[in-house]
């Protein structure tokens, strides 16, 4: 059995094909859900938002023009919905400096180093990045989008995508350094 | 003082995409050549690969959406499909019938339909809306319209109260009277005469909720 391309699934969804919608959901729901969890930091709310994203896809499939990949299109909708939610509840957004301060209160770098190995430290530092930095890191490393695709999702120029990722990686190095891990860069 | 080499700076910016294999052929070849020349650039590429590995592990640890959310989504989709079928059925039949007519017959039919609509508009006004004046009327019930425009709306039988409320909210409308004959409600919307047509189109674009939305041709009593 041949596997239908995303674009073909969207064409069928635009005609009201429920089965095609199931196929698209099976293929992309986990990635969209994880992208949302990383932004809103609440699995329940991320599930609700993910459901809204796919319902938008169902209702608006006839407006998909193929200028971006289906993944890019869905992540763009997801980002818009997540940021709208965060704007409605601004007190719930934790930026990296606040997270860093909280972690500093709990663990000194020495204690953190004792508690976790290098890999754990890296993941904790990835978690501690600001939303802006987390998003660009996730889109490049986990969702494996190209420069132009990330630019479409984040609605910023391609040049800004490159510098934003560079700054996110520098910030990661700084957080790792705080945790006692020197990467020798930058 | 040394001037930074912009190409080397660009190489550093592109390392993450080299790690994920998402560079175009030209960029990848150029970066491969630079990596062969510069051992420190290769070390920095390894840093990017480590970042990718840990980012993937972090995301995979987040799990997957629950069965509950999947079921909820497809319930919404099924409701939407049912709404489309209800509104699409008679429209499709009329469309098929019109498609089978020759142009002269079609033109004549359109003219007759226009006349019929005008006639019905008049009948609607006089029959449904022109009911006898009540024997008494409170001062607060006087039918002056305090801004906005009154339209007539029939809601789809399967539309839930929640969806009707959402639709009215979006149209900045509120029910002021009804149901009247034909299950018509009088709805006051915030749109002025200029924006009326757009608001009616938006309402009609909700087939699962709105069956009919037309301007009120004369002030109702």
Image: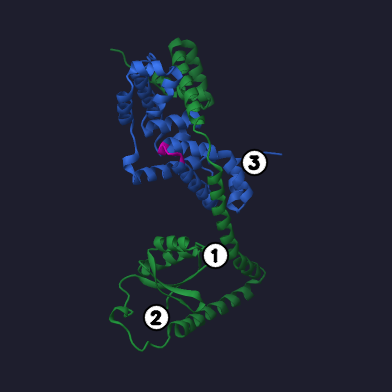
Chain colours: A blue, B green
Task: Work out whether A123 lies above or below A73.
Answer: above
Residue under numbered circle 3: A4
Pair 2/1: label in front: 1
- Badge 2 marks a residue whose secondary structure is loop
Badge 2 sits on which subunit?
Answer: B
Label 3, label 1: how far apart the Cα atoms are: 34 Å
Instruction: Residue A40: say if magenta.
Output: yes
Residue under numbered circle 1: B158
Q: Are marks 2 and 1 in contact (CB under 8 Å)?
A: no
The x and y percentages for residue B4 are: 34, 17
Question: Looking at the image, which residue is at 44% across and 67% down?
Answer: B200
Q: Are marks 3 and 1 on the same chain?
A: no
Depth check: B186 or B98 in front? B186
The x and y percentages for residue B49 are: 49, 20
The x and y percentages for residue B151 are: 42, 72
Pair 3/1: label in front: 1
Badge 3 sits on which subunit?
Answer: A
Q: Residues within 10 Å of mark 3 (few under 14, many from 20)?
A: few
Q: Residues within 10 Å of mark 2 (few under 14, many from 20)?
A: some
Residue under numbered circle 2: B220
Dot label at residue B80 = none
- Asked whether the viewer can see residue B193, the reply is yes
Question: Looking at the image, which residue is at 28% across and 12% down?
Answer: B1
Task: Work out whether B86 lies above or below A78.
Answer: below
Label 2, label 1: how far apart the Cα atoms are: 27 Å
Part of the protein shown in magenta:
A39-43
């Amino acid at each position: 059995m041949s596997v239908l391309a995303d674009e073909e699934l969207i064409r069928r969804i635009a005609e009201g094909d429920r089965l095609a919608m199931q196929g698209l959901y099976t293929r992309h729901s986990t990635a969209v859900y994880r992208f949302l969890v990383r932004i809103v930091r609440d699995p329940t709310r991320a599930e609700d938002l993910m459901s809204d994203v796919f319902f938008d896809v169902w209702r608006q499939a006839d407006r998909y023009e193929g200028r971006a990949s289906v993944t890019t299109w869905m992540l763009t909708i997801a980002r818009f919905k997540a940021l709208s939610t965060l704007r409605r509840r601004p007190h719930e957004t934790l930026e990296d400096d606040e997270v860093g301060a909280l972690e500093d209160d709990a663990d000194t770098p020495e204690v953190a180093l004792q508690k976790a190995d290098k890999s754990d430290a890296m993941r904790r530092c990835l978690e501690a990045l600001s939303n802006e930095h987390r998003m660009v890191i996730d889109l490049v490393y986990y969702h494996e989008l190209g420069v132009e695709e990330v630019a479409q999702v984040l609605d910023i120029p391609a040049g800004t995508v490159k510098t934003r990722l560079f700054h996110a990686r520098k910030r990661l190095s700084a957080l790792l350094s705080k945790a006692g891990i020197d990467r020798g860069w930058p | 003082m040394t001037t930074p080499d912009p190409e080397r700076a660009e190489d550093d910016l592109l390392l993450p995409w080299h790690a994920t294999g998402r560079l175009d052929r030209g960029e990848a070849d150029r970066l491969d050549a630079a990596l062969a020349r510069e051992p420190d650039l290769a070390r920095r590429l390894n840093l990017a690969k480590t970042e990718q590995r840990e980012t993937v592990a972090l995301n995979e640890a987040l799990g997957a959406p629950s069965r509950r959310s999947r079921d909820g989504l497809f319930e919404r989709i099924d409701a939407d499909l049912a709404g489309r079928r209800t509104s699409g059925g008679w429209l499709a039949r009329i469309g098929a019938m019109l498609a089978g007519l020759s142009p002269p017959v079609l033109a004549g039919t359109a003219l007759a339909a226009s006349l019929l609509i005008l006639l019905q508009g008049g009948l609607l006004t006089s029959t449904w809306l022109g009911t006898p004046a009540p024997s008494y009327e409170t001062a607060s019930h006087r039918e002056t319209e305090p801004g906005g425009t009154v339209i007539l709306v029939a809601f789809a039988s399967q539309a839930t109260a929640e969806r009707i409320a959402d639709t009215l909210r979006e149209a900045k409308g509120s029910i002021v009277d009804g149901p009247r004959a034909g299950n018509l409600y009088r709805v006051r919307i915030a749109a002025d005469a200029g924006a009326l047509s757009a608001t009616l189109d938006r309402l009609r674009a909700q087939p699962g909720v709105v069956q009919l939305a037309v301007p009120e041709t004369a002030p109702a009593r």
